[in-house]
Image: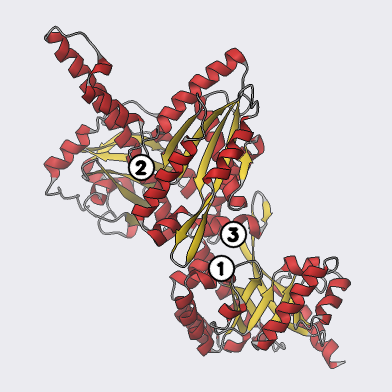
């Protein structure tokens, strides 16, 4: 067994660790909530906040482990703090450092470990947030980012706790010093004490109260509500796409935006109301009902009308909007924590619905949030346990009526919930980074299926596969597709790759390079869901495209909307001028099909011709189409 070496800065590191006053402290719900979340999120039996002391590692919080400490010699975390990057051990039984470690050969039988270092206020590595499994596994980049985010939350809790303890200690020392010199005890009279108390309870950038101050204010408001029966509202405001502001404008300008938001909203509050900042892109508001405005929701709408604004940016303006969740007291929570957590839950739901939404809390949102967390955890194992499968929806030539191709569509058959709709699990996959391995698997499955149909002697048509944003922009997709085609022997013209408008516009220069590389292989390139993004035909001229797919929202409105019919006709005409074939998605009625034919659309993918089919059903569909064509 390889014992962890002692860092060169061990004395300073131990001093920083003991300064936190965490060692030996009582359990705290704020820390325990993080380890519970980590265990659920990564679907692991053990999650720990581990602090590496002189001869031991001690667990500030633990899930799935009875021991509150172990020796430092067998500690994985003691190895992790020697590194600057997170430490991931896919299989400890195959790692020379740990193969004969007692924690591997005996309880708790560690096979997988992933730990992110925890830093003290003075940037010393004092421990880790880690997740442990009793079976080997991998951790993809998206999972690692999520673990980093949780570790950062642990650090913020440590800092706040340490600063609060320091302020309390200094206040006590100052009072004792004044008492020794016969001065009256006046905690608020000391400028230093007052400054420390302010720092503990306020956000330094905006000068607003912090989350803890908001919780205290909500608790006081609940007491008044019980006494007088006057309702109040708690709102969580999250700035949409704030990361984009940082990237485009720089952190200094983004900080100025936050300060301006704080000032403009603060100016609209009435006596007794409170605005707080709880995170980098998040604000909290407490609004009380008044005799002249008995509904605090109306006050929030007036505030948001001012807060939403256009921000100057290179090349134009960016709309600044908020996703907002609200909770009303007393109905939506019996204490301050519950009210604030419910407002946050509603905000996350609002964010899923699109930008600039206000979502009131309801009990169903908590159920949905719990289901989402469960699905996120289970999705990590879905590939390994063969729960994902692919169906293929036919595309038909509108002139000849013959089969023109298929689109590969991923599905998830959950062992408990049944078949999960793609619009429910694909966003989860995109947020967590799981979309990359899932997309790679769908692409490989589709190419292998094409090879199987060719081997069976069928009259094979092209199969389209949708590329995710991360797959397209963050991986070497040209090399991956090249290797797949060479391995399978499938001609490149039988593979069609689809990108959404937003993906192609995220990094236009890279998009052109990657699409050109795929086109040179002989692969067909298509833009999916055209009409829902921001691209124009002028932009499309720059891209090496072969096809354009019209979003189903336009197609489904064609039968009863002259405007939609005119839009589709215009899109088809312009696409044909650019020598692009046009596919319509979502046609379900004879009326829609007739309108598409009249618009001179080339192909249709929709339930009018067929629902998505299994690979076996597609085989029969191909044979039936061949027989009909020969007749």
**Mark 2 or mark 1: which is in front?**
1
For label 2, the residue is 107
Helix, strand, or loop for circle 3? helix
Label 2 or label 1, whichever comes before in sequence order: 2
**Mark 3 or mark 1: which is in front?**
1
> In this rendering, is residue 388 above or below 31?
below
Query: Where's residue 409, x and y in %?
Result: 65, 68
Side (left or right) of 87 relative to 327: left
Q: Which residue appears at 59% of the width and 51% of the height?
A: 352
The quarter of the image holding the C terminus is: bottom right
Q: Can residue 280 be seen here?
A: no
- Given residues 234 and 416, the one toward you in this image is 234
Query: Where's residue 251, x and y in %?
Result: 35, 54
For label 1, the residue is 502
Side (left or right) of 390 relative to 35: right
Q: How are the colours assigned in the image?
A: secondary structure
Cα–Cα gap, marks 2 and 1 = 49 Å
Cα–Cα gap, marks 3 and 1 = 16 Å
Q: Which residue appears at 64% of the width and 87% of the height?
A: 578
The local crowd at label 1, few if under 14, some if 14 to 19, many if 20 or more residues have their Cα within 10 Å, is some
Helix, strand, or loop for circle 2? loop
Label 3 or label 1, whichever comes before in sequence order: 3
Q: Quadrant of residue 621?
A: bottom right
For label 3, the residue is 426
Asked if labels 2 and 3 touch by Cβ distance under 8 angstroms, the answer is: no
């Amino acid at each position: 067994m390889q014992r962890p070496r002692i860092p060169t800065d061990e004395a300073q590191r131990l001093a920083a660790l003991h300064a936190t006053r965490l060692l030996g402290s009582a359990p705290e719900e704020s820390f325990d909530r993080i380890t519970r979340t980590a265990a659920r999120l990564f679907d692991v039996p053990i999650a720990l906040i581990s602090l590496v002391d002189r001869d031991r590692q001690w667990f500030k919080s633990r899930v799935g482990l009875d021991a509150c400490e172990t020796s430092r010699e067998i500690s994985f975390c003691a190895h992790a703090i020697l590194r600057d990057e997170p430490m991931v051990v896919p299989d400890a039984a195959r790692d020379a450092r740990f193969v004969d470690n007692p924690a591997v050969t005996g309880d708790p039988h560690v096979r997988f470990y992933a730990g992110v270092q925890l830093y003290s206020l003075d940037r010393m590595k004092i421990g880790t947030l880690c997740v442990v499994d009793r079976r080997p596994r991998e951790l993809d980049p998206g999972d690692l980012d999520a673990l980093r985010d949780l570790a950062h939350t642990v650090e913020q809790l440590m800092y706040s706790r340490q600063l609060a303890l320091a302020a309390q200690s200094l206040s006590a020392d100052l009072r004792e010093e004044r008492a020794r010199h016969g001065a009256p005890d006046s905690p608020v009279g000391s400028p230093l004490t007052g400054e420390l108390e302010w720092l503990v309870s306020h956000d330094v950038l905006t000068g607003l109260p912090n989350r803890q101050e908001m919780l205290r204010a909500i608790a006081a408001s609940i007491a008044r509500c019980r006494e007088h029966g006057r309702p109040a509202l708690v709102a969580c405001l999250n700035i949409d796409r704030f990361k984009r502001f940082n990237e485009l404008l720089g952190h200094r300008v983004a900080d100025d935006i936050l300060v301006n938001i704080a000032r403009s909203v603060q100016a609209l509050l009435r006596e007794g109301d409170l605005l707080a900042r709880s995170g980098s892109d998040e604000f909290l508001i407490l609004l009380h009902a008044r005799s002249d405005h008995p509904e605090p929701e109306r006050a929030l709408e007036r505030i948001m009308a001012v807060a939403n604004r256009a921000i100057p940016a290179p090349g134009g303006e960016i709309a600044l909007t908020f996703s907002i969740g609200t909770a009303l007291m007393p109905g939506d929570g019996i204490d301050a924590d519950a009210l604030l957590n419910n407002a946050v839950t509603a905000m996350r739901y609002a964010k899923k619905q699109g930008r600039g939404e206000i979502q009131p809390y309801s009990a169903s949102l908590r159920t949905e949030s719990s289901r989402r967390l469960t699905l996120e955890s289970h999705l990590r194992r879905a590939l390994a346990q063969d729960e994902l499968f692919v169906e293929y929806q036919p595309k038909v030539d509108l002139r000849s009526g013959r089969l023109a191709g298929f689109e590969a569509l991923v599905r998830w058959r959950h062992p408990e919930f049944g078949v999960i709709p793609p619009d429910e699990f694909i966003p989860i996959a995109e947020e967590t980074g799981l979309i990359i391995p899932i997309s790679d698997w769908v692409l490989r499955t589709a190419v292998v299926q094409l090879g199987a149909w060719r081997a069976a002697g069928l009259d094979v048509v092209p199969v389209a596969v949708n590329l995710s944003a991360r797959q397209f922009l963050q991986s070497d997709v040209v090399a991956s597709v090249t290797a797949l085609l060479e391995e399978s022997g499938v001609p490149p013209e039988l593979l069609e790759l689809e990108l959404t408008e937003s993906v192609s516009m995220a990094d236009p220069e890279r998009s052109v390079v990657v699409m050109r590389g795929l086109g040179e292989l002989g692969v067909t390139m298509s833009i999916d869901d055209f009409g829902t993004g921001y691209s124009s035909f002028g932009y499309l001229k720059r891209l090496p495209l072969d096809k354009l797919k019209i979003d189903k929202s336009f197609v489904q409105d064609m039968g009863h909307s002259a405007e939609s019919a005119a839009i589709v006709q215009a899109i088809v005409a312009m696409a044909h001028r650019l020598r692009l074939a046009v596919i319509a998605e979502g046609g379900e009625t004879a009326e829609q099909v007739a309108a598409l034919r009249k618009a001179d659309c080339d192909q249709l993918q929709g339930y009018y011709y067929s629902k998505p089919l299994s690979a076996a059903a597609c085989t029969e569909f191909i044979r039936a189409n061949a027989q009909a064509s020969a007749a």
